[in-house]
Amino acid sequence: MAATDTHEFASGGLNGPFQNAAAVSPHDDNDLTNVSAAIQVGGNAGNIVMITQGGSTVTLAFAAGQIMPIRATRIKATSTTATGIVTLW
């Protein structure tokens, strides 16, 4: 199932404040319920492998507590080492 983009028609609303947050269970095949506006690592620092809204698969390094503005549709389990991942939108 494709992720729902709640910002599709928004103007200027992608920089927060965010209205929703959800803990992420990384999965190689399942999309997020909603396209993220940002991702936070609330646990241990590490890498997050994700698929961006544009369809690119990227690996980004996150520090513990870091919030990064990025539009992602999936957080992959394989090679993701960060913990306590939260998607914000």
Image (cartoon, grey):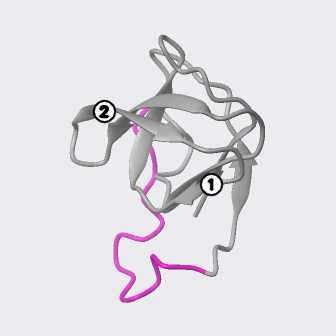
Please tell me the numbered disc located at residue 66. Answer: 1
Q: Where in the figure is residue 6, as x and y percent of width and height? A: 48, 66
Q: Amino acid at mark 1?
A: Gln
Q: Residue furthest bottom?
A: 12
Is 33 above or below relative to 69? above
What SS does tag 1 mark?
Answer: loop
Q: Position of residue 67 (x, y in %)?
A: 59, 58
Q: Earlier in the sequence, mark 1 or mark 2?
A: 2
Q: Amino acid at mark 2?
A: Val
Residue annotated with mark 2:
58
Q: Give the image quarter of residue 70.
A: bottom left
Q: Residue at x 30, y 33 (%)?
A: 58
Q: Dot 1, crowdedness within 10 Å: few (<14), some or many (≥20)?
A: some
The picture places residue 10, in percent across and down from the top left corner, at 39, 82
Is residue 68 found inside the magenta-colored segment of the image?
A: no
- Magenta portion: prevailing SS class: loop
